[in-house]
Amino acid sequence: ALEGGLFDDNWRIRQSSVQLLGDLLYLLGNTKAVGITDDEEAEDNDIGSGDAKTAASMEKALGKERCTAILATLYMLRSDTSSVVRQCTLQVWKTMVPNTPRALREILPVVMTQIIQALSCENVDKRAVAGRALGDVVKKLGERVLPEMVPFLEQRLAQGD
């Protein structure tokens, strides 16, 4: 139910779901939320306060697949249309992930799958979030990610998902 609320049409439900998920992840990772600033530089800063111990605790408790799916969802929600949801998600992300580009490379296939699903959704907000997230992936990983993304996109298009 909590994961379902992350993509709800109502931004308040998305925000509450992110906050609850963050609280759960903080407990699993034996950490606490970090403070973030209100400026735009906070979103561009790729260094978080998470560490390997936090990530290992989270992965042990949730399993690798679920942990990857949750991080991919959080990454997408960093581009939400609601600034409140973006800020809340950014706080959780920066607390749990020590290095955004490294984490993004690890979860890239799941992120791309979620982006493709959201781009094909009828909800305009979800498509906007997916478009912004795709732009952010390219911005963060630059030319290094294109050789991985293009074949993945072609494969998914050929499958007709």
Image: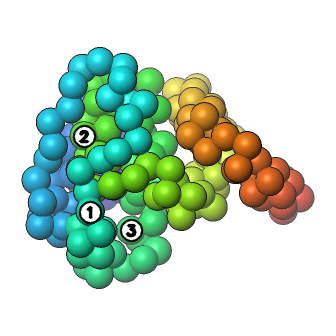
Q: Nearer the viewer, residue 158 or 58?
A: 58
Q: Secondary structure at mark 3?
A: helix
The residue to which callout 1 is attached is: 51
Q: Report whether 2 appears left or right of 71.
A: left
Residue kind at label 3, given as amino acid type: Cys
Give residue 100's position: percent from left, percent from top. Answer: 44, 49
Give residue 42's position: percent from left, percent from top. Answer: 32, 29
Q: Secondary structure at mark 1?
A: loop
The quarter of the displayed image where residue 37 is located: top left
Residue kind at label 1, given as amino acid type: Asp
Residue kind at label 2, given as amino acid type: Gln
Q: What is the distance, in whole Å, between disc 1 and disc 2 at their CAs?
A: 15 Å
Closer mark to the observer between disc 1 and disc 3: 1
The quarter of the displayed image where residue 81 is located: top left
Q: In the picture, which quadrant includes the N terminus?
A: bottom left
Is residue 131 depicted above or below 31 in this figure? above
Coloration mode: rainbow
Q: What is the distance, in whole Å, between disc 2 and disc 3 at their CAs?
A: 17 Å
Q: In the picture, which quadrant includes the C terminus?
A: bottom right
Give residue 52's position: percent from left, percent from top. Answer: 30, 69
Closer mark to the observer between disc 2 and disc 3: 2
| Tag 2–tag 3 contact (CB < 8 Å) | no
Q: Of the numbered discs in the image, which one, if any, rests on residue 91?
A: 2
The quarter of the displayed image where residue 43 is located: top left
Does residue 34 appear in this view?
A: yes
| Tag 1–tag 3 contact (CB < 8 Å) | no
The residue to which callout 3 is attached is: 67
Q: Secondary structure at mark 2?
A: helix
